[in-house]
């Protein structure tokens, strides 16, 4: 705190009001010597007098202590900082909401997938359809979640695409394992038809393998990969 600078500022404020030290002393109820000591920087007003001086000169106490009026650039910087902080706070709230929405959608999508695969038998197309629906909801949740993590759209889309590939691979693997080891029909076949060579064979085509169901609905039923 520069008392000389403060004193010069007080002197400047007094002259702006076209007051003498004597006149100011009378208005403030102090002696001429006290005013002189303030303006030379040899003494400082107490806190009560600082409040009174700030009101009298229409300035703030920080301006008196700093020994200068706040410049327009300082005011502008303060406003810009306040706006930036407000925008940052708003963006953080939006990010938090997107994380919550994304997390809920992912959880709901997983719930639908697990429920569909557990409730519906492999022969029913509903299990596969609901699993695909759950996957779509899950991918939407991933997109919302990545919006709070990545600014660029490219990274968000790559994240969603990566999850889609992962789900596709997981469904294909579980389908293959179910046919090979549990002798169940595949859930995610894109075409089902009876064999023209053997009418007792129901053929299921998937992207990676072809499954055959011999004698469907009988005691001799058998499911295998061709």
Image: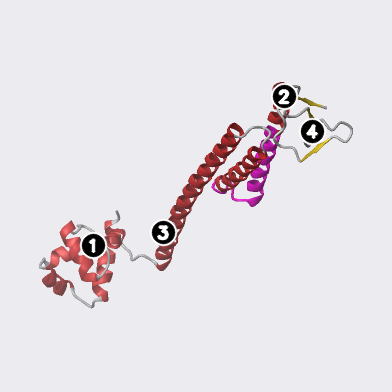
Is 7 left, or right, of 130 in this rendering? left
**CA gap, disc 3 and disc 2:** 66 Å
Q: Residue furthest bottom?
A: 18
Give the residues drawn in magenta, as a range: 147-171
Tag shown at residue 82: 3
Q: Is residue 169 magenta?
A: yes
Q: Are marks 2 and 4 in contact (CB under 8 Å)?
A: no
Q: Residue at x 36, y 65 (%)?
A: 70
Q: Are marks 4 and 1 in contact (CB under 8 Å)?
A: no
Q: In the depicted view, which residue is nearer to us: 170 or 115?
A: 115
Q: In the depicted view, which residue is nearer to us: 54 or 174?
A: 174
**CA gap, disc 3 and disc 4:** 70 Å
| Mark with earlier residue (3, 4) | 3
The residue that label 2 is drawn on is 183
Residue 170, how many percent across, how many down?
Answer: 68, 32
Q: Residue at x 63, y 37 (%)?
A: 127
* Secondary structure mostly taken by the magenta-highlighted segment of the chain: helix
One can see residue 61 in this view: yes
Q: Is residue 181 above or below residue 35?
A: above
Residue 220, how many percent across, how many down?
Answer: 76, 22
Q: Secondary structure at mark 4?
A: strand
**CA gap, disc 4 and disc 1:** 105 Å
Give the class, few, some or many, for how many residues have Cα within 10 Å of label 3's Cα (few <14, many ≥20): few
């Amino acid at each position: 705190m520069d008392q000389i600078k403060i004193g010069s500022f007080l002197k400047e404020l007094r002259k702006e009001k076209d007051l003498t030290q004597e006149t100011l002393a009378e208005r403030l109820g102090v002696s001429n010597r006290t005013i002189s000591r303030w303006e030379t920087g040899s003494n400082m007003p107490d806190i009560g007098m600082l409040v009174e001086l700030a009101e009298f000169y229409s300035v703030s106490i920080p301006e008196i202590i700093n020994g200068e009026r706040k410049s327009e650039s300082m005011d502008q910087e303060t406003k810009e900082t306040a706006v930036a902080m407000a925008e940052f706070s708003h963006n953080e709230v939006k990010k938090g909401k997107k994380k919550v929405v994304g997390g809920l959608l992912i959880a709901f999508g997983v719930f639908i997938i697990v429920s569909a695969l557990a409730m519906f038998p492999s022969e029913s197309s509903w299990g596969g359809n609901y699993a695909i629906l759950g996957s779509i909801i899950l991918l939407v949740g991933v997109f919302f979640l990545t919006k709070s993590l990545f600014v660029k759209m490219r990274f968000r889309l790559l994240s969603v695409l990566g999850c889609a590939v992962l789900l596709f691979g997981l469904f294909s693997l579980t389908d293959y394992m179910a046919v090979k080891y549990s002798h169940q029909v595949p859930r995610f076949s894109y075409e089902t038809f009876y064999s023209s060579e053997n009418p007792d064979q129901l053929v299921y085509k998937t992207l990676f393998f072809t499954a055959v169901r011999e004698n469907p609905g009988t005691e001799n039923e058998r499911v295998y990969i061709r």
